[in-house]
Amino acid sequence: MFRCKAINFLFSILPLKYWQDLLIRRHIQKCPSCQKKLARIDEVKPFLIGENKVGSLEGLWHGIKAEISQGKRKEQRSLLLRLRWAFGTASFLIALAAGIWFYRNPTLVKTPLKENLVERFQINYVRIENKPARAFLFQPHDSEMIVVWAEKNI
Amino acid sequence: MDDKQLIENCLDGDVDEFRKIVDKYRGKAMALALNILWDQQDAEDACQDVFIKIYLNLDNFDFKKSFSTWFYSNLYNRCLDYLRKRRRFYKLFKRVKSDHFLLDDTKNSSSFELQSVIKGTLKDLSPKERTVLFLWVNEGYTSEEIASVMKCSSSTARVHLFKARRKIKAVLEKENVSMQGN
């Protein structure tokens, strides 16, 4: 009896459930005196709400079915919505990436005029005072201006 | 037909096949939810939520494990969510403790004969202890099975069960003494 009291005292002061469980397994489960202080299944049963006390639950299934079928429709709709969002986001990201790339490489957008000068301008001949003249094309650096210079052929 | 067969049929078939699972578990589910929440409306909502969640996650069910344990585990967590929500609500309005709300609410509900229970012990038990008792008494679960439902160690489950049984016994003895005194 003294041992049971000591165990109960220990149980109340031990902070960890593992140690409390140790006492239960080592002593309380085996001790008839301690077992008497625990309610049996038949004693606990009246204290709980049993399956027989829950009443009719016919409406539960209708609610579940409605939610499930609604959920399926929602799922289909949300799939379409998600696809639209994915497409929109992807387009935006591609445009953004392209914008950044072009911004960082402006030379690729503006092809140097010097290199394309011959392709863009072609002067077969220039005449001054009814005589063929010498022609020169100039383009100032970083400018789109093109200067055509002609001088008499001496 | 066992649970796993029902789930396989459900995965192959239509929604109506799921009704068999609902019919099989709705009573037990409602009883557990009521034991934890003590509120008819919340218990029904929790049960409905869990059945829907179960249906949507049937693909993830591990056939090596017990369906009832998985189901009760989901339901237990959902009920705890409802309790937390209720506590937040009451904290917000600085009212009385949620337990008082529960007791007042059950007084109004005519579908349960809870008066004797209210007067007795269950108000002294925590939701965890009530869950442990329910699973032990109604389902015959061992402490290991209870632990897997509550996602705790078997030691913790055993301690909860021990404390709950001791509290009930104490109340019963007290009532006996008072009845003998009268």
Image (cartoon, grey):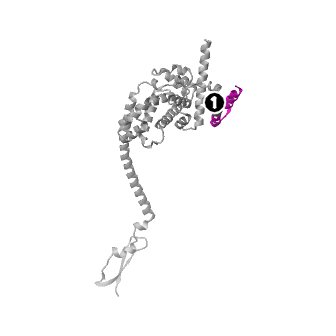
In the image, taking residue B151 as reference, residue A102 lies left or right, namely left
Of residues B99 and B92, the one nearer the viewer is B99
Q: Quadrant of the C terminus of chain A?
A: bottom left
Residue B19, by quadrant, is top left
Question: Could you tell me residue B12's position as x and y percent?
Answer: 36, 42
Would residue B95 be seen by someone viewing this image from the given angle? no
Q: Is residue A38 above or below residue B14?
A: above
Query: Residue at 38% across / 52% down in the picture?
Result: A87
| SS for dot 1 | loop
Which SS does the magenta portion mostly show? helix
Of residues B163 and A30, the one nearer the viewer is A30
Q: Which residues are magenta?
A: A1-22
| Outermost left residue | A130
In the image, taking residue A152 as reference, residue A141 lies left or right, namely right
A10 inside magenta stretch: yes
| Outermost bottom residue | A154
Question: Could you tell me residue A60's position as x and y percent?
Answer: 40, 30
> What crowding class fits label 1: few (fewer than 14 Cα within 10 Å), some (14-19), or many (20 or more)?
few
Residue A10, by quadrant, is top right
Residue underneath mark 1? A30
Residue type at mark 1 is Lys
In the image, taking residue B20 as reference, residue B93 lies left or right, namely right
Question: Could you tell me residue B101's position as x and y percent?
Answer: 52, 25
Residue A106, by quadrant, is bottom left
Q: Is residue B121 above or below residue B82?
A: above
A129 inside magenta stretch: no
Q: Is residue A95 above or below residue B11?
A: below
* Chain under callout 1: A
